[in-house]
């Protein structure tokens, strides 16, 4: 499974933690909100590609950021099934996708990689 989304960043705001920014953007049929940790990576272009994959990419040098994580699930099964968004935590860096990504499975490792759309 490899999901590729071209996202236009609408805004980047300061987060609650020092060095944290929160980016929001939209793509074809999806909204995304995610953390940017300034000491780890920065978004310079307003158009990016986010890939969600089951395996790491062969060449990491074309990405601004690439890390692995898991879907954040609700402790109550009913609440988890009813929510209309997906949250994936990559080392505590949160990525929220709306509407829910139907092909993401709980307890399965995913790689989220970001690169400029110009590449």
Image (cartoon, helix red, strand yellow):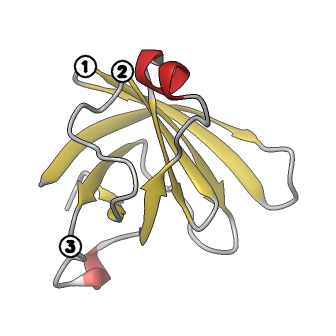
SS under mark 1: loop
Residues at discs 1 and 2 in contact (Cβ within 8 Å)? yes
Which corner quadrant of the image does residue 70 belong to? bottom left
Question: Where is residue 92 shown, x and y percent of the image?
Answer: 64, 61
Q: Which mark is residue 99?
A: 2
Kindly report the distance in space between the C-alpha atoms of the residues bearing marks 3 and 2: 23 Å
Q: Which mark is residue 118?
A: none
Q: Is residue 90 left or right of residue 114?
A: right
Query: At 44% across and 15% down in the image, what residue appears?
Result: 82
Q: Is residue 12 left or right of residue 106?
A: right
- Neighbours of disc 2 within 10 Å: few (<14), some (14-19), many (20+): some
Q: Which mark is residue 55?
A: 3
| Residue 14, placed above or below residue 37 | above
Towards the viewer: 70 or 37: 70
Query: At 27% across and 54% down in the image, what residue appears?
Result: 52
Question: Where is residue 9 shown, x and y percent of the image?
Answer: 46, 35
Question: Where is residue 15 shown, x and y percent of the image?
Answer: 79, 44
Which corner quadrant of the image does residue 97 belong to? top left
Query: At 86% across and 45% down in the image, what residue appears?
Result: 16
Kindly report the distance in space between the C-alpha atoms of the residues bearing marks 3 and 1: 24 Å
Kindly report the distance in space between the C-alpha atoms of the residues bearing marks 1 and 2: 8 Å
Question: Where is residue 34 shown, x and y percent of the image?
Answer: 55, 44
Select label 1 or label 2 by which is in front: 2
Residues at discs 3 and 2 in contact (Cβ within 8 Å)? no
Which corner quadrant of the image does residue 64 belong to? bottom left
Disc on the earlier residue, 1 or 2: 1
């Amino acid at each position: 499974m490899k999901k590729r989304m071209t996202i236009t960043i609408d805004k980047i705001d300061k987060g609650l933690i020092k060095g944290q920014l929160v980016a929001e953007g939209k793509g074809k049929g999806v909204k995304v909100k995610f953390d940017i940790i300034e000491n780890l990576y920065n978004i310079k272009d307003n158009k990016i590609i986010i890939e969600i994959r089951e395996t790491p990419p062969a060449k990491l040098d074309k990405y601004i950021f690439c890390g692995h994580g898991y879907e954040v699930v609700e402790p109550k099964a009913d609440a988890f099934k009813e929510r209309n968004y997906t949250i994936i935590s990559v080392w505590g860096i949160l990525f929220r996708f709306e509407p829910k990504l139907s092909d993401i499975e709980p307890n399965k490792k995913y790689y989220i990689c970001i690169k400029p759309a110009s590449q």
